[in-house]
Image (tube, helix red, strand yellow):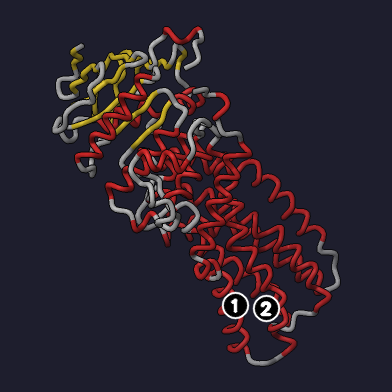
Amino acid sequence: MPQTSTAAAPLIDVRGLSYARNDCPVFGPLDFRVERGEALLVQGGNGAGKTTLLRVLAGLLDGESGEVRMAGTSAGPATRAGHIAYLGHLPGLKADLSALENLDYLCGLLGRRPSLGLEEALAIVGLGGYEDAAARTLSAGQRKRLSLARLWLSPAPLWLLDEPYANLDLPGIELVNRMVRAHLDEGGGALVTTHGAYAAPPVRTRLLALDAAAEAA
Amino acid sequence: MSISSATPTLFSAARALVERDLRLLWRRRGDALQPALFAILVVVLFALAMGSERELLSRAAPGVLWVAVLLSGLLALDTLFRGDAEDGSLEQWRLAPVPLAWLVLVRTLMHWLTTAAPLLLAVPLLAELLYLPRTLWPVLLLALGLGTPLLSLLGAVVSALTVGMRRAGVLLALLALPLYVPVLVFGAGSVTAAAQGHDPAGGLLLLAAGLLMALVLAPVAAATAIRIASQ
């Protein structure tokens, strides 16, 4: 990571963030922050607002109240775009394109780290040999792995992972944990939602329990 | 790991989108011909129904050709953002570090290129079927060349508005038709004017002005509509 003046500021600093859909409060107000090299585990049952929180942070939902600062600056759409990599429920893959073509397109759109090749990234997530397989022929877990390859190539320091363990087998879960750890070792940060069924990645972790909307450090 | 060197520029993001659309087009090349086939079908059926009266057909030709092109454009409109909305591509567009309006513009122009452009190639054949005098071909092609991208851009705004709905077919047509009417009137009108020996420049210039305005305003409006529709 470049050691700039913003290196000391937390990757994301949220104060009094709350969101209401049609005047019906979904979550909040929340206060939390994620430093470099830290993961925040967002826990909560179904419908607790985990996905909504991540979508608000990514800038996909408007109308929240409260303050979101990223790397020391107030986060407008332009700041967020370069700062965040979002892994949501919809992978954004084209069924008719091959795995490699999908990755090529998404990286062209979202940016990528120049240090790593596309085939290498596919090999890392366990899709070596599937480069030319159309996305429609991949299983749900393999599609998830393809999204993980996209995430791994992303230059953004903050990962927003919405249920990253869904559809993955045990080695896949291990892979997510390894990726998160490596990303954090490089000075990145991650917000991971989970409904609590899986072990957390073995890293410095804060916990945000959405049901009670209280933070335990 | 440097952020600035890896950030896509307007150009590289557009190239990624264009490459994707061309690949998708190649994978489903049968679908790409649908709008052109639909327009040919309309014109052929019309010609058969009207009989072989050369005079009548040639007088109706500008209107029939324009209506066929407009309807086939309307038919293809639903595919503009539908697929990208359903598989989550639109979400990634919104997260990309380039303006959403720019991606919308590139996508709309690609959509025009893959649905309307093949149709323009078939227009001389259709004009021949309807006995349109060949001296009118340049005016007809120019009017369609200005009018169809304008229709695509107007359609993009409407299509973006309905992107959050599951089945928007009829609603899309109802919303788009009022916007399409002026294009139809000036487009068909300029060809008719030329057929009657008048100067077609007025209608063509209005189409050109409309196209310029739509090129600037429609992507911004469509991008805003996508943001609102996918809340």
> What is the C-alpha distance between the residues marked 1 and 2?
7 Å
Q: How many residues crowd around disc 1 within 10 Å: few (fewer than 14), some, or many (20 or more)?
A: many
Residue sitting at x 50%, y 68%: B31
- Label 1 sits on a secondary structure element that is helix
> Which residue occupies the foreground of this view, A89 or B12?
B12
Q: Is residue A20 left or right of residue B79?
A: left
Residue at numbered disc 1 = B40
Residue at numbered disc 2 = B126
Q: Which mark is residue B28?
A: none
Residue A193 pos. (x, y %)? 24, 29
Residue sitting at x 79%, y 80%: B133
Q: Is residue B102 above or below residue A8?
A: below
Residue B82 pos. (x, y %)? 43, 54
Determine whether label 1 and label 2 are within 8 Å by CB: yes
Q: Does residue B208 appear in the picture of this structure? A: yes
Residue A184 pos. (x, y %)? 34, 20
Q: Amino acid at mark 1?
A: Ile
Q: Is residue B20 above or below residue B5?
A: below
To which quarter of the image does residue A158 belong? Answer: top left
To which quarter of the image does residue A177 belong? Answer: top left
Residue sitting at x 42%, y 17%: A70
Residue sitting at x 55%, y 41%: B221
Q: Is residue B199 left or right of residue B215?
A: right
- Label 2 sits on a secondary structure element that is helix
Q: Going from the N terminus, do you reach mark 1 or mark 2 first?
A: 1
> Which residue occupies the foreground of this view, A112 or A185?
A185
Residue B145 pos. (x, y %)? 71, 61
